[in-house]
Image (spheres, rainbow, N blue to C red):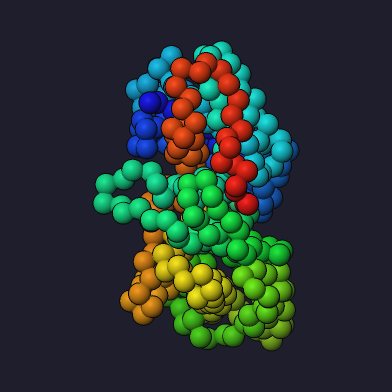
Amino acid sequence: TYILAIESSCDDTAAAVLLNDKTLSNVVAGQAVHKQYGGVVPELASRAHQQNIVPVVHEALRLANVKKEDLAAIAFTSGPGLMGSLLVGTSFAKSLAMGLNIPLIDVNHMQAHILAHFIEEENYSKPTFPFLAMTISGGHTQIVKVSNYFEMEVLGQTIDDAVGEAFDKSAKILGLPYPGGPLIDKYAKLGNPKAYKFTKPKVDGLNFSFSGFKTAVLYFYQREIAKDPQFVTNNLNDICASIQYTIVEILMDKIKKAVKETGIKQVAIGGGVSANSGIRDALKTAEGKYGWKTYIPKFEYTTDNAAMIGIVGYLKYSAENLENTGFKETRVMAQSRLKL
Ligand code: ATP
Ligand code: FE
């Protein structure tokens, strides 16, 4: 079964073709236009999706060597995301599915970040149910209990900024370009994580908060720069290492708590921030120290991509027996058990 998947929830226009649970192509067109604004501008994102969607889908089909007539279904991101951006992918997917007379499968973006772990890959062992998923990205910070492909429950999430924003906004304060997360990671590797101390927010339960942390970084910067205009230039590695250390501690404190409360010792991560070397090291350490099993998918499946939409499409296609149904919009039964 060939499935075409389309993702356009934020600022990446992405298309993928899957053969059952295997990726044949996974194309992502980023949008450079936002860089100069230091963040995503929704109106510009929608316009860029309009320009990119046709070439990106063509490229995905070409790389997969699949003709559109061979597709069994089309999966697309129905939310959450920016409305204008979502509309581009949604209208395109719907029209193409109608034209080809094949089923149209709507996919929840956060569920897709989690089920990306089930894309068939050589040398990747998949998590088994139940497991805990931590989705950490520029727009989300969630801990989810995953009981089944379609049965998941959010145990905790951010009450303000996402963890990726904490990285990016801290980087912006230090004068680094957007997105600054990867740069903080790069400099952090060369610095002392205990050089400076930032207080951690106190938030109930398994929820997160990062807005206070961002303010702490700003005040720290203003205080030090007033004393020494060269402070950031001279101490960049130590500052980045200390910021990263604190953010990783905040994440690890909560995931440890989640493991303790649920008794589930499998932790799977997703979202762009899972590329961070600090969180990867901390999870590795936890494997040895607490006997957890941790799962980190290939980088191209952690950031926004369409292959993760495709795997959910395939799982729903199978669960719903959508073979030979012709055009049909699914609101799969399973979605109702999803508390995302
Ligand atoms: P969504 O929340 O919908 O997934 P997004 O596009 O912001 O949206 P991703 O593409 O998954 O999310 O992730 C981007 C975020 O990941 C940015 O905030 C970026 O700074 C951060 N990031 C990427 N690599 C690293 C890294 N090595 N260390 C820290 N942060 C990183
Ligand atoms: Fe995402």
Q: On the image, which quarter does residue 291 sit in? A: bottom left
Could one spot residue 314 in this view of the protein?
Answer: yes
Specify whether 163 is left or right of 280.
right
Q: Residue 257 placed where, x, y %?
A: 54, 75
Q: On the image, which quarter does residue 219 sit in? A: bottom right
Q: State the residue in front, 125 or 191.
A: 125
Task: Specify the quadrant that holds the N terminus.
Answer: top left
Q: State the residue in front, 278 or 312.
A: 312
Number of disc labels = 0
Specify whether 24 is left or right of 53.
left
Q: Residue 264 placed where, x, y %?
A: 45, 67
Could one spot residue 15 in this view of the protein?
Answer: no
**Picture layout, residue 275 above or below residue 19:** below
The residue located at (51%, 70%) in the rendering is: 262
Q: Residue furthest left?
A: 123
Q: Residue 41 placed where, x, y %?
A: 70, 45
**Picture layout, residue 55 above or below residue 183:** above
**Picture layout, residue 230 above or below residue 164:** below
Q: Residue 55 placed where, x, y %?
A: 51, 25
